[in-house]
């Protein structure tokens, strides 16, 4: 395999930064072709200066203007919004598109990249949650691989390598349990934003950290696993594993369990996606099992963390419901981050939005975007209707 050209969507986030660390470790095998980011113009400017990409994309005209004002030498193509992401993803020198952005903004770019025949590495759950049928159908049509970068799905991908899907009994996704794993319902109702952002094992962005605290992150992964691996909802289980050493497991029909273990560092699954189908020498130190010590597992508390059950409900309902779940969750989390609602209001916002929705087909980009817009508006109405209380 020669030098692989990388398009990195979401380059200024935590996954983006980790991806660039992997690029730095393998300069003879990986090259940055495109960079796209949200609003962090200063950090993107430093990345542009270091990697000299052929395409740069930014979320808004204002962010693009701030990037230009830094004085960094920019490439000929500097795109804005969805067009900028698409330009970054489909450049002819790109072999692998790494989607590290949060939310749904990269959907059009991923579909365009698939249409252009690019391999996709997804570190973004929302794209498959809101448009799983659309994206996977496009990938099958174009014979494009979708490689998971999330540590859990990456672990399952490794366990399933070269195996027949008919041999799968169930997939077991592990979850740390977040900062509130042992909290009572009363404590959850008093939880502050500062409390919720204290993830015990991973350093992540604010949105995904809140999703981990509610267990919605795991719920989104359940839906994502369905699309990535073609299994039924009843073949996907979640187990709480506070140490985050076992990244996920597969049980086969003969009762055998295969697990993938590794250090708690996102550079490991990122490197796997960049090197696949090969493996490269370790970038990180080996996992020391003796120092890891005791590994614990427990069932998730669906009563205290209803977001996980709502995700299963959405997956079983199918069609447009996962898209509605995803949009309502984004509004709920954003409202919590803004101090407008409490922590336990988030699942209420999602459930009431889902209850107001009648499932319809979500098999076109226009349909998905229309559903996403409706669900965000409906969730915003729910937020406004909640009883006034002390902002968290």
Image (cartoon, rainbow, N blue to C red):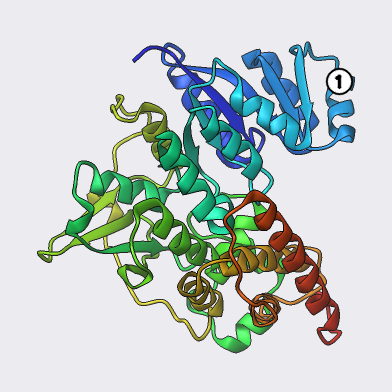
Q: Within the image, what quadrant is residue 73 found in? A: top right
From what the image shows, is residue 65 above or below residue 31? below
Give the image location of residue 168, x and y in percent: 21, 60
**Residue found at x 41% / y 15%:** 29
Residue at the (61%, 20%) spot, across then down: 91
Q: Residue 290 at x, y = what percent?
A: 22, 51
Residue 285 visible in the picture: yes
Identify the element where label 1 is drawn: helix
Towards the viewer: 295 or 280: 280
The quadrant of the rendering that contains the C terminus is bottom right
Front position in the image: 49 or 361:
361
Give me the residue at 38% from left, 57% from top.
244
Say above or below: 126 vs 54: below
Q: Image check: 116 left or right of 190?
A: left
Indicate whether 347 appears above or below 21.
below
Picture layout, residue 200 above or below residue 82: below
- How many residues crowd mark 1 within 10 Å: few (<14), some (14–19), many (20+)? some
Residue 125 in sight in this render = no
Picture quarter with the N terminus: top left
Q: Tell me where residue 234 appears, x and y as whole percent.
A: 33, 73
x%, y% of residue 199?
55, 60
Residue 242: quarter of image: bottom left
Front-lying residue, 85 or 367: 367
Q: Is residue 202 left or right of residue 155?
A: right
Residue that extends furthest to the left in the rendered view of this protein: 254
Which quarter of the picture shows residue 65? top right
Q: What residue is pinned by disc 1? A: 68
């Amino acid at each position: 395999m020669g030098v692989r050209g990388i398009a990195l969507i979401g380059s200024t986030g935590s996954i983006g930064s980790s991806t660039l660390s992997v690029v730095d470790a393998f300069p003879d095998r990986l090259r940055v072709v495109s960079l796209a980011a949200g609003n962090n113009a200063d950090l993107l400017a430093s990345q542009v200066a270091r990697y000299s990409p052929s395409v740069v994309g930014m979320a808004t005209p204002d962010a693009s203007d701030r990037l230009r004002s830094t004085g960094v030498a920019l490439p000929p193509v500097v795109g804005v919004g969805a067009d900028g992401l698409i330009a970054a993803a489909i450049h002819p020198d790109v072999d692998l598109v790494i989607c590290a952005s949060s939310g749904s903004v990269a959907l059009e770019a991923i579909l365009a990249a698939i249409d252009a025949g690019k391999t996709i590495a997804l570190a973004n759950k929302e794209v498959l949650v809101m448009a799983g049928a659309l994206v996977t159908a496009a990938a099958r049509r174009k014979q494009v691989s979708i490689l998971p970068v999330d540590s859990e799905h990456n672990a399952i991908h490794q366990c399933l390598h070269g195996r027949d899907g008919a041999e799968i009994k169930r997939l077991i996704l592990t979850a740390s349990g977040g900062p509130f794993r042992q909290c009572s319902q009363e404590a959850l109702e008093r939880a502050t934003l500062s409390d919720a952002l204290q993830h015990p094992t991973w350093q992540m962005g604010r949105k995904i950290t809140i999703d981990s605290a509610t267990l919605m992150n795991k719920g989104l992964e359940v839906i994502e696993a369905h699309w990535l691996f073609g299994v039924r909802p009843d073949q996907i289980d979640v187990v709480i594993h506070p140490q985050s050493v076992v990244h996920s497991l597969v049980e086969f029909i003969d009762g055998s369990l295969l697990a993938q273990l590794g250090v708690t560092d996102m550079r490991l699954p990122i490197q796997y996606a960049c090197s696949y189908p090969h493996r490269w020498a370790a970038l990180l130190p080996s996992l020391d099992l003796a120092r890891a010590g005791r590994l614990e597992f427990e069932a998730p508390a669906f009563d205290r963390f209803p977001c996980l059950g709502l995700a299963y409900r959405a997956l079983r309902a199918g069609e447009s419901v996962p898209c509605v779940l995803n949009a309502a969750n984004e509004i709920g989390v954003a409202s919590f981050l803004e101090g407008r609602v409490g922590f336990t209001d988030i699942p209420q916002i999602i459930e009431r939005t889902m209850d107001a929705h009648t499932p319809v087909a979500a098999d076109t980009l226009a349909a998905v975007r229309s559903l996403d817009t409706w669900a965000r508006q409906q969730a915003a109405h729910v937020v406004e209707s909640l009883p006034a209380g002390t902002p968290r």
